[in-house]
Each structure stands twice: as structure tokens, then as C-alpha cells.
Image (spheres, coloured by chain):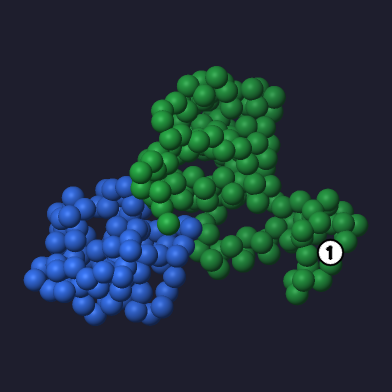
Chain colours: A blue, B green
Amino acid sequence: MAQKTIAGQSIDLNDEGYMVDASQWNREVASEMAKEGGIELTDKHYEVLDFLRAANEKGETLTIRRVGKSGIVDIKGLYKLFPGGPLKYSSKYAGIPKPASCI
Amino acid sequence: MANNESPLKKVCIICAKGTIEDVYATLVMANGAVMEGIEAKVFFTFFGLDAITKKQMNRIKTATVGNPAMRAPGGLPFPTILGIIPGVEAGVSAMMKSSMGKLDIPPVDEFLEMITAGGGEIYACKLGMDMFKLKKEDLWDEVKDVLTIGDFYGLCGGENTQIIFT
């Protein structure tokens, strides 16, 4: 585990760069993390992040299919928002653990 | 955990069998690849063509005969002789699909859509199509092309590419 200052706050990250404590998350932190990954977050991105955070809080298993059926964005759109790792990167910027799912 | 120095860049998956387990192994690997940003190309041949044939794609089954790893619910033995009774194969397959549905594993057509949504490409084998007298219009609409194995190998070049046969 490592600590990193993101958007002026000290954030705990695991070895893969995922946030350990979801309560340390805010929009600025997400924005700066995403920028580092080459993504400029838009309202649509935040809608996905909010959905993931809410689902994670309820203890749901997250899959790309689940996000595709959220009504926020279809799967193709999700790939456009988070290229190269739709579920992986969106979870990272949502401050939730890396999804332990194969779908 | 991951090898960041030389990551996998492309997988080329060949599916030659049409049972639930073979087809889903292929679909899970292909979808898993595109979700990780790995290019995926899938070649369906012989009985695997069922997975991309409109009439058959959502009707694939698991073999209830000659499948020693298959057990009845609760882990009880499932003698092969039961597997030959009419309706058993359909019933077992329906049960498998229902337990997969609970894990959010989609039906074949939707799974293929998820793969192509992520940029994965689906191909059909020309020889297999000729054998089963299938035409392009019998296939799922998003099948990119009908190829010979040589054509498919032509798509499998590049460093850090793996060919997987299920």
C-alpha cells in the first residue's frame, strides 16, 4: 500500500493504484486520477462513477453487462468513455476496488 | 501480479466445438481480453459454428453423455445412461444456463455483442461452412467475414500475440 497526494489530499492506494478507502474519494480526486490515465472526465463519466460507487456500496458484483444495463451508457459507449479497460478504469476512478469479475 | 514489461497484446481464439462449456470458454476469454484492452479475434469452425449461426446460437447444449465431470445437484453421481433419456440433455442445459444467468453471464448473442462492442472481431471458417452447407446469411449479422484458416493466421501476426484453441 502506498500513499499519494492527489488533488491536495493524501490518498491510500494499493499496488495496482486502486483506492483502498472509498470514503477518501471526491470528484477532484477522480478527475486528477483520470487525467493521469489520459482521460478528461465529463458529466457522463461521473454518472458512471456514481453508479459504480452506489452499486459497490450495496455490495453488488460489478460486471460490464451490469453497467451496460444501467441506462446510463451502453457497453459500446462505456468502451468509448474508458478506452482499453472500461470496467477496470472506471472502477479505479470511482475509488472502488478492482472488480473481481470475468465478465 | 501483472507482467508490465511485455504485456499480452492480442489473442486469436479458435472455437471448434459447440457445447455450452466450449463456446462459453471462448466467449469469456474473448470478452475478458477486450475488457483488458487486449485485441481479440475469434474464429469459429466446425461445430463451433453453432455459436454464430442465428438458428442455433441460443440453443447450444452441454453433453450429458460421456461427461464424467457432470454431477447431479448436490454432487450426486450422474450415470451416463441417464444422459441418453430424451429431454435430459435439454433439462441439464437449461439448468446450466440458469445458473450462469445468476452470475450475470449473458446468452450467446448478447455475449458476442459485448465482445464486438469492445472492438473484438468474430470470424467464421470457410471450410466448416462448406461442410455444414451454411451461407453467410445464416450467420449472426455481426460476423465480420468468412475466412480460410490461412486468412485467419494472416490476422494473427504481431508481437505478444497468442493463439488459443478451445
Q: Residues within 10 Å of mark 1 (few under 14, many from 20)?
A: some
Q: Secondary structure at mark 1?
A: loop
Position in image of residue B27 (x %, y %): 53, 47
Position in image of residue B48 (x %, y %): 64, 38
* Between B129 and B5, the one nearer to me in the picture: B5
Residue corresponding to mark 1: B78
Q: Is residue B43 above or below residue B115?
A: above
What chain does badge 1 belong to?
Answer: B
Name the kind of residue labelled 1 in the image: Phe
Q: Is residue B141 above or below residue A56?
A: above
Q: Residue furthest right?
A: B81
User: Which residue occupies 21% across, 53% down?
Assistant: A37
* Between A63 and B135, the one nearer to me in the picture: A63
Residue A44 seen in this snapshot? no
Q: Is residue A71 above or below residue B120?
A: below
- The number of numbered badges drawn on the structure is 1
* Between B36 and A48, the one nearer to me in the picture: B36
Q: Is residue B155 above or below residue B54?
A: above
In the image, is B6 to the left or to the right of A7?
Answer: right
* Between B63 and B11, the one nearer to me in the picture: B11
Q: Residue furthest left?
A: A8
Position in image of residue B88 (x %, y %): 80, 59
Residue B102 seen in this snapshot? yes
User: Which residue occupies 16% across, 74% down?
Assistant: A10
User: Which residue occupies 51% across, 25% down?
Assistant: B152
User: Which residue occupies 31% across, 70% down?
Assistant: A1
In the image, is B7 to the left or to the right of A90?
Answer: right
Position in image of residue A21 (x %, y %): 28, 77
